[in-house]
Image: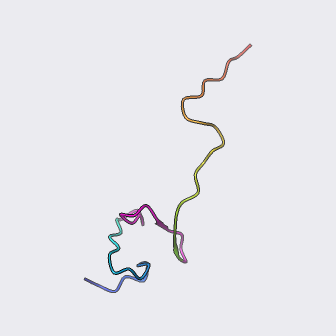
């Protein structure tokens, strides 16, 4: 196992090619953190046009 600078220090990081770890965190270019959720429009919401 290599010393990946993206590892959070747990020694258990498995990071894919898209910079996501198995725990759900993502590399933001500086540190591992949980990605912000886009809540601008809830899934499944259908807007009615009048």
Classify residue 49 as left or right of residue 24.
right
Q: Which color scheme is applied?
A: rainbow
Q: Main secondary structure of the magenta part?
A: loop
Question: Farthest left residue?
Answer: 1
What segment carries the magenta color? 17-30
Q: Position of residue 1 (x, y in %)?
A: 25, 83
Position of residue 32 relative to residue 36, above or below, is: below
In reply to whether residue 21 is colored magenta, the answer given is yes
Which picture quadrant has residue 21?
bottom left
Q: Residue at x 53, y 74 (%)?
A: 29
Question: Farthest bottom residue?
Answer: 3
Q: Position of residue 45 (x, y in %)?
A: 60, 28
Position of residue 18 relative to residue 48, above or below, is: below
Q: Residue at x 63, y 37 (%)?
A: 41
Which picture quadrant has residue 11?
bottom left
Classify residue 31 as left or right of residue 24.
right
């Amino acid at each position: 196992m290599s010393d990946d600078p993206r590892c959070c220090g747990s020694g258990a990081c498995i990071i894919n090619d898209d910079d996501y770890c198995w725990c759900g965190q993502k590399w933001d270019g500086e540190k591992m953190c949980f990605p912000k959720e886009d809540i601008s429009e809830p899934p499944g919401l259908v807007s009615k046009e009048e």
